[in-house]
């Protein structure tokens, strides 16, 4: 259930997305240094970066229903073109999972105030 007393803050959401892109890039670099066994971590961080970078520049970040529709449209997309990942299927699974997480956050309008690197 969404909290009616809490007002949607597009600037806070945009700031959260920007911070998540930066954190995802750091996570990718750390996974890359760890090597072969961290390929899944790399793909997961790349998925987070892909999602957040697609959403942070959108004009509909200031409007909660429009932002939710944008996320839903991305979930319904057939493929997510990106280069430099290890496993396309795993990457797409992580993208859809992260989009579902964002859809839930958008619906409840909670979690965007957490700007820490590790979540």
Image (tube, rainbow, N blue to C red):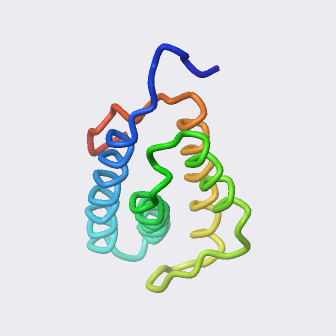
In the displayed structure, would residue 115 be above or below residue 82? Answer: above
- Please tell me how many numbered marks the rendered image carries: 0
Residue 58 coordinates in the image, percent (x, y): 46, 60
Which quadrant would residue 12 be assigned to in this image? top left
The percent coordinates of residue 24 (x first, y second) are: 34, 60
Choose between 30 and 81: the one closer to the eye.
Answer: 81
Indicate the position of residue 5 as horizontal and vertical percent values. Answer: 48, 13
Q: Residue furthest top?
A: 5
With respect to residue 2, does 111 lie above or below? below
Position of residue 54 measured from the top left corner of the image (x, y, whole percent) = 47, 65
Residue at 30% x, 47% y: name it.
Answer: 15
Q: Nearer the viewer, residue 72 or 19?
A: 72
Q: Residue at x 59, y 48 (%)?
A: 66
The C terminus: image quadrant: top left
Give the residue at x 49% y 61%: 51
Residue 112, picture quadrant: top left
Between residues 9 and 32, which one lies in front from this camera angle?
Answer: 9
Asked if residue 42 is positioned above or below residue 18 in the image, the reply reads below
The quarter in which the N terminus is drawn is top right
Q: Quadrant of residue 13?
A: top left
């Amino acid at each position: 259930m969404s909290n009616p007393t809490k007002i949607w803050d597009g600037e806070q959401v945009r700031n959260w997305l920007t911070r998540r892109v930066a954190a995802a890039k750091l996570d990718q670099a750390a996974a890359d240094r760890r090597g072969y066994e961290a390929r899944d971590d790399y793909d997961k961080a790349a998925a987070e970066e892909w999602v957040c970078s697609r959403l942070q520049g959108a004009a509909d970040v200031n409007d909660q229903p429009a932002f939710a529709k944008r996320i839903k449209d991305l979930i319904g997309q057939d493929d997510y073109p990106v280069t430099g990942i290890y496993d396309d299927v795993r990457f797409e699974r992580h993208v859809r999972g992260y989009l579902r997480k964002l859809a839930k956050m958008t619906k409840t309008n909670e979690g965007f105030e957490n700007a820490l690197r590790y979540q």
